[in-house]
Amino acid sequence: MPVISARTDLDALSMTFVTEHDAPVDRVWQLWADPRQLERWWGPPEWPATFTRHDFVPGGWSTYVMTGPSGERAPGWWIATRVSAPHRFEFDDGFEGQDGEPDPAMPAISCTVELDDVGGGRTRMTFTSRFPTPGDQAMLNGMGIEEGTRAALGQIDELLA
Amino acid sequence: MVVDTLSPDEVDRLFQALADGTRRDILTRALTGEHSVTALAARYEMSFAAVQKHVAVLERASLIAKARHGREQLVRANPAAIERARALLQSYEALWRHRSATMDAILAADRP
């Protein structure tokens, strides 16, 4: 089943992908809950993932490494922030520093997975990832700045669409 | 693929720079020609310093470049960086298409 919709919200710094699958919610949940299933689909093409840890409980850590076609290694980690089986899973997806530990200088991306029964044994999955809110923007907002003209705003959004 | 050649903090700077309506507006203006920071500042109901700050955020993300022209700093867009942002968003979408198709293959393998 193709991606039903892909949407970028630049103001919220978020991207949302909606897909539908021909399997019940409990079964689709296993694709996230079971590390052996998860690692079969998480990595991009040519970059298979191996999950070395997957504590699928609130506050639990997952660690993985993706291996590229020339043996490059791209390690990453998750920390689960909400696990409500079988409908909702929230986690922060972060990068590792040179020392193999989570890199505090590299803000994590907040991800939300929602699974909904759409009838007929089918499941809709909505995946949303939010980039960190920029500190400099908070600072600018704190300066009490009024938004200026937005007449040309749509053009950039279209450009990026 | 693994999200092309930008480092994670470059990606971060890029999206953070684009996450503000005023900055997108400045960027759009800069795409259509060179503008001095003074001329840009006159267009917004905010202080010169605030506009300068927005310009600096765009510059750090390489979305615009500044060039000195006499006593003025001229701002223009860097189309290559905008193209990188677009390509990056497309690569995320492509990644989810791939993941979705792979999930379907795993789910299909369950069935007899």
Image (cartoon, rainbow, N blue to C red):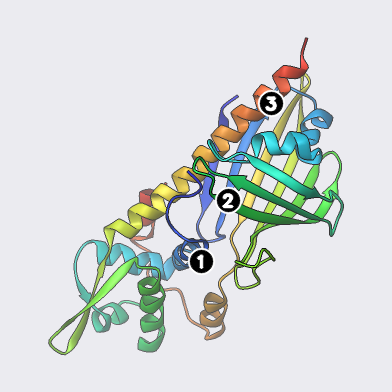
Q: Residue B49: image x %, image y %?
A: 38, 88
Q: Residue furthest top?
A: B112
Asked if both marks, 3 and 2, belong to the same chain, the answer given is yes
Q: Residue A140: image x %, image y %?
A: 51, 81
Q: Residue at x 56, y 33 (%)?
A: B98
For residue A55, side relative to residue A52 (left or right): right
For residue A32, side relative to residue B19 (left or right): right
Marks 3 and 2 in Cβ contact (< 8 Å) = no
- Looking at the rendered structure, the kind of residue marked 3 is His
- Tell me the CA gap for discs 3 and 1: 34 Å
Task: Pick the residue in front: A18 or A91.
Answer: A91
Q: Residue at x 53, y 43 (%)?
A: A68
- Disc 3 on helix, strand or loop? strand
- Disc 1 on helix, strand or loop? helix
Q: Residue A89: image x %, image y %?
A: 78, 47
Asked if both marks, 1 and 2, belong to the same chain, the answer given is no
- Looking at the rendered structure, the kind of residue marked 1 is Asp
Task: Pick the residue in front: B88 or A51.
Answer: A51
Tell me the quarter of the picture where residue B65 sits: bottom left
Q: Chain of mark 1?
A: B
Q: Is residue B65 above or below residue A95?
A: below
- Disc 2 crowd rating (10 Å Cα; few below 14, some 14-19, many 20+) is few
For residue B58, side relative to residue A51 (left or right): left
- Disc 1 crowd rating (10 Å Cα; few below 14, some 14-19, many 20+) is few
Residue that badge 2 annotates: A73
Q: Residue furthest left?
A: B70
Tell me the quarter of the picture where residue A115 sits: top right
Mark linked to residue B61: none
Residue that badge 3 annotates: A21
Mark linked to residue B9: 1
Asked if both marks, 3 and 1, belong to the same chain, the answer given is no
